[in-house]
Structure formats: structure tokens, C-alpha cells
Amino acid sequence: MLFVALAAGVFGLLPQLGGLTRDAAGLRHGRLGFMVAAVVAQALSLGCYALLYRQVLAALGAKLRFRLAVDVVLASFLVSHVAPFGSAAGSAVNVSTLEKEGIAAATTGEAIALTSLVSTAALVALFGTGFAATAGRHVPQAYLVTSGIALVLVVAALVAVLGVGAHPAVAGRAGRWAARVARRFRPGIDPDKVAATSRRLASLARSALTGRAAGTSFGFAAGDLLFDLLSLDLMFLAFGYQPGFGPLAVAYAAANIASAIPLTPGGLGVVEVTLVAISVGFGSPRATAVLAVLGYRVANYWLPLIPGAVAYLRLRLKLGDKNSSERAGSTP
């Protein structure tokens, strides 16, 4: 019931805020072909993200079918976009699902972290490329300052994670320290075992972030972002305007970096405001930017919730069937 109430709130209340219902009425004037192409680009973007997650798991020694990877990504997307503390709730769905597939929770957690890490590295690269392409052009300073602060925090996190991954001994000490703290609340935790697991996962992470595996992962992450960016561009084209790669890449990357600060589920509101403000700052007509961004967020945020709900229910039913089979097998 709580899940239904949250979903009703997200779908029913949030679109009413800020006059979005009135602005969204203008979406029907967009060119349908471009809008359909934007939705297809979003599907390809999600497919690339599922491939990225599957590739990272494989580098950690865990094999996952592509169909299951897609279901897990979509279900996690749904939960993280409608539930309180969305990212943690989405990760919990991810971990519980893969545990039933024989993949340890520690491995899944490592894969989630590494997937986010590679995706963030690709986002930073896109921001830098777009910023270089717009050298000398005016852009609203307030939003660049905000995204710049977030970018510094993201890069600092990247450096910290890479530093730990490059030194398994450091990861072991960090794991032992965390286990000792957690042991105050759960006495059954063994710091030595946690330290050993941390060292093993750090070694696997190092292999996942180097060589061919790293290149493949970065390629999938880049595909995810570029198809998502293409979806935004197609929505602008649907309303007869082409911002250009540089301005669009800066606006897109800045919006995603700013949304890394977990103020709302999926950056709802933060992404829209940042995209519109920076696009207008680069010369986009305000009315066009508002419609294009709203159309993009329908394809990027709202529509994936539908297959996400289907995937979530499918996984829940599958987990229920497995639990019933396990209980039946343990009954004398």
C-alpha cells in the first residue's frame, strides 16, 4: 500500500507543481517522428546501461543473463524514482534479486558501485568535451558554479574509490574498521572475514577497471549517456530548434552532476530547472527549451517507470516462486 501511495503521489502530485500541466499541454505540438525517435533513444540508453552493469558483474566473476540484467536495472530504476531514499531502496532490490541467482550481496554491492563509478567517469568526460566545445560562449554562472561544486565532489569520490581499488591492503583495513563499527549493532559480524572480502573485491575491482574490461565498460557507459543526450537533442528538434552539441552536452552533464545531490527522486525538478536555465543561457528560446526538456523528461523519467513496474512485479513473482520451492524442498 505504501508503494502504491508513493507511486500515486509521484504521478499525480508532482506534475501539478510549477504549472507543469499547463506547459506540458504544448507537447502535442511537437513533431511526432522526432518524439518517437527520442523514446527509442531512451530504450537504447537503458539497454547500454544494462550491458554496462552486466559487463561489470562479469569482470567480478558473476555471470548474468542480459534479460535478467535489464529487469534488474528497470526494477531498480522504478524503486529509486518513487521510494524514499530511492538509491538505497533500488540497491536493496538489486541485491535481493541477485542473491537468489547465487550472486553474493558483497559482489552485487561492488558491481553497483563500480557501475556508478564508470558511468560518472563518462559523464565527467562528456562535461569536459562539451565545455571545450563552448569555449568563449556565455553561460549562466550560478549553474556552472553549482555543477562545478558537485563535479569537485564527484571527482574526489572517484579518486578515493580508485585509490582503494588500486591498493587491496587499504581496502582490507577500511573493511575491518567498518566491520568493527557495525559490530556494535550486529555482534555476529566478523571483522577478519570482512577485511578478507574487502581485499578480494578490491583486487577484482582493479581488474575490472583496467585493460580491455575497462574499455568495454567505458564504451557501454558512453553509449548510455550519448543515447540519452540524443534523446534530449531529438526533443529539441521536435520543436524546431537545434542547440548544438556543445551547449547541449554542457547543459546535460551539468544537470546530471547537480542531480547527484539527492534532493529529490531521480533529480526531479533539479534536472528540469538546470537544463532549461543553461539551454536558455546558450541562446535557446525559453518556450522551446521548456517544452523540449519536459518532453525529454517524459521519455527519460516517466515512461521507463511503466516497464520498470512490469519488471519489478516479474522479479517479485519470481522470487516468490523460488521461496515457495525452497520451503517445499525443506519440508520433511
Image (cartoon, helix red, strand yellow):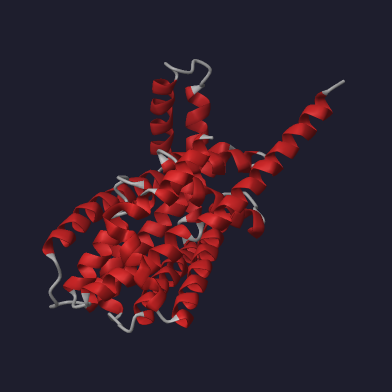
Q: Work out which quarter of the rendered image holds the N terminus and state it.
A: top right
Q: Is residue 86 above or below residue 213?
A: above
> Residue sitting at 30 percent across and 52 percent down?
17
Tell me the quadrant of the picture where the C terminus can be found.
Answer: top right
201, above or below 28, in the image: above
Q: Is residue 323 above or below residue 55?
A: above
Please tell me which residue is depicted at 24% across the width and 52% down the height of the picture. Answer: 150
Residue 51 lies in what quarter of the image? bottom right
Residue 43: % across, % down: 53, 67
Vertical comparison of 116 with 227: above or below: above
Q: Is residue 286 left or right of residue 160?
A: left
Q: Position of residue 244 (x, y in %)?
A: 29, 81
The spot of residue 138 in percent (x, y) is 12, 74
Measured from the top left, where is residue 112 in percent x and y? 48, 48
The front one of 196 and 280 is 280
Please name whichever residue, 135 or 28, is drawn nearer the observer in this view of the structure: 28
Q: Residue furthest right?
A: 332
The answer to whether residue 9 of the structure is visible from this angle is: yes
In front of the other: 65 or 230: 230
Residue 235, image quadrant:
bottom left
Please report the residue visible at 27 percent of the width from the left and 72 percent of the height from the top. Answer: 289
Q: How many marks?
A: 0
Q: 63 or 7, which lies in front?
A: 7
Q: Is residue 56 visible?
A: no
Please identify the quarter of the rendering in which residue 328 is found.
Answer: top right
